[in-house]
Each structure stands twice: as structure tokens, then as C-alpha cells.
Amino acid sequence: MFNNKKNNRIIADVIILTVFIVTVATAYLMISRARIERVPDYSSRDSWAYFAEGEDKDADLFLIAPTVYTGDRNNMSVGEKKSLSNFVAALNMERGIYEDDCRMYAPFYRQAAMSVYDLNSIDREEYLELAYEDISNAFRWYLDNQNDGRPIILAGFSQGGDMCLRLVKEYFDNEELYDRLIAVYSIGWSFDEEDVLQYPQMKPATSADDTGVIICFDCETESVGDSFICPAGKPHYCINPLNWRTDSIHASAASNLGACFTDKDGNITEEIPHFCGGYIDTDRGVIKVTDIDTSLYDNPVPSLPAGSLHVYDYMFYYRNLQANVKNRIEQYQNK
């Protein structure tokens, strides 16, 4: 009988310990999941990488970060300090194109991870829709609480460019809001005629001076024939930032005002005037880069083909883009 009591105590202790472990593990998972999936509160300054930076500027910039999250989840947590640090660094590397002329806003968001782009276009949409849910919430809060009728530039690179186009689709069929749109710099992304037919407010840029338009391009070597950004077999709208043409006329390196390579604080570490030329491959709507040894510029994005120069899209044409932002603001003001 003594042994039975002892055995029963042991069994009871094991059960209690098991329940305790399960409870702790469940609580940890719930806390961890809540941290990972926390929805940003855009009324809080902590949910913005940039918030009203440059109060004396004539236009507002709503800037959306590219893909920086390379972790094992499908969407970045806005509670991970390392991810947020990389997020700000990516924004800093392109902010110089806009900051001289714009009051800047840039929301943190649960962006899709780099690995999501290894999925097919249908399967990846779930994670991009979650990312866009945050972007849309941030933009709505900005419109309701900060814009006050000011002219707007939307800008983003790569995933950020995709999010810009989604904003145009959702919000800018409103005529009053569209009238405030200076331009959309959707760099490193694409759209096509089907988009325009469905969303007439999506107007491709055709010159250096038009406003209310979308500037799109992505860069490659001449050997590339396909990518998920600009798939083969379908022409995409594209404008060459060296000559601001939409045809295949080659722009020489002499028209390049300066490529700029920056550090994570946004400081220009190297500037090279007349760096490269380029022309548009009108079959797909991409820029083929010329006049440099493109083998010196690696493609670090696994889901893009060898020869993609996607990560250099704004770096190669930095000063041309910077001058164009100023020009389009002036054109808008003159209207």
C-alpha cells in the first residue's frame, strides 16, 4: 500500500509538472505571437520611422520601405528591434532623393519577408495583403490627421513600390485627393495596361514634367529576359530616368547627373557623375544598363535572376531622380 501511495504521488507530481510546462509554453507562444502580430497604432509616433520630418517643405512625402526582413516568418514583426533598425537604414539610403523638397512620413509595417518572393504570385499575395493592410491604415491616418490638403508624393522602392501602386488603386479614384498628387515614384516595380484599364487613376509618366503620374522602372543587364517584377511576354510601363522618355532611345552616360552610394545613415559615401547609360527594352518595360561593367554589381536577391540590377535602381540614377522630384513639385505649383 505504501508503494501505491508513493506511486500515486509521483504520478500526480508528473501531471502537475506537465500541466505547468504546457501552461508556460502556451503563455509564451501567446505572448510571442502577440508581439509578432501586433498591429501598428499609427496614432503613436513609435509606429513611424519618419514623422513630419521637414516642416518647412512645400510637399508631403509618404515613403514606403523596401523588403529588409530576411527572417523565418512570412511577415516582419513591428516589435523586433533589429528588423526596425534595418528598416530605418533602408529608408535612409534613399531619403536624400526627397528630403530637400518634402516633409517626410514613413510608417513601420508588417512587410512581407524576402522569402515570400520565392512563392508563386498567388501564394505570396496573402502576406503582401497583410503588409498592405498596415500601409493603408497608416495612409488613412496620415490623411485624416496630418495632410491638411497639402500636395503629396508617394514613393517606395521594390516592395515599397508595390505598396505605392496599391495605394493609388484604393485611394486616388477620389478626384479631390488625386488633384493633390504630384507623382508616384514606384521604383523597382511595374504595372501594365490591364491595371490602367481597371484603375484609370493609374497614369504612367511620359515626360520629366507631367504630374499626377507614376514613375516606374527596374534595371537589368542586357542578358536578362525575365523576372517576377517584369515577366516576359507582357510589356510594362517604364520611363528612363536619364532622358525621361518611354521609347527605346538610348541615353548615354553623359546624361547621368550622378550615381550615389550611401551608408545606412543616408550619407553619400561615393558619387560618380556620368556613371552609366541605359535604354528601355520595350518588349518587357525594363531598363537595360549600359556603359559600365555590370559584373561588378552582384544581385543579392535570390528570387531574381543573375544579371538583375534591381537593388541599384535608385542608386544608379540618384541625382537624376533628385532633380526630377524638385522639377515635378515646381510643375505642380505652377499649375
Image (cartoon, rainbow, N blue to C red):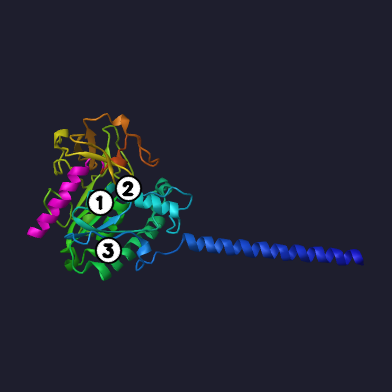
Which structural element holds mark 1?
strand
Above-or-below relation of 214 to 280 = below
Image quadrant in which you'd find residue 102: bottom left
Tag 2: amino acid: Asp
Q: Nearer the viewer, mark 1 or mark 2?
A: 2
Give the amino acid at mark 3: Glu
The residue lying toward the viewer, choosing from 235 and 44, is: 44
Alpha carbon of mark 3 to alpha carbon of mark 2: how far? 32 Å
Nearer to the camera, 191 or 240: 240
Image quadrant assignment for residue 14: bottom right
Rate crowding at label 1 as few (under 14), some (14 to 19) or many (20 or more) other CA atoms within 10 Å. Answer: many
What residue is at 39 percent from the left and 64 percent from the top?
40
Please state the extent of the stretch shown in magenta in the rendering: 315-335
What is the distance, in whole Å, between disc 1 and disc 2 at their CAs? Answer: 22 Å
Is residue 326 shown in magenta? yes
**Left or right: 73 as drawn, with respect to 274:** right
Q: Is residue 126 at all visible to an observer of this figure?
A: yes
The answer to whether residue 239 shows anywhere in this view is: no
Q: Earlier in the sequence, mark 3 or mark 2?
A: 3
Specify the quadrant that holds the C terminus: bottom left
The image shows residue 25 at horizontal and vertical percentages of 61, 61
Q: Mark 3 or mark 1: which comes first in sequence?
A: 3
The mark found on residue 166 in the picture is: none
Which residue lies under the disc numbered 1? 186
Which residue in the structure is indicated by mark 3? 170
The picture places residue 241, in percent across and down from the top left corner, at 18, 43
Q: Which residue corresponds to mark 2?
A: 265
Q: Is residue 301 above or below residue 129?
A: above
Find residue 152 and report its horizontal and vertical position in percent.
20, 60
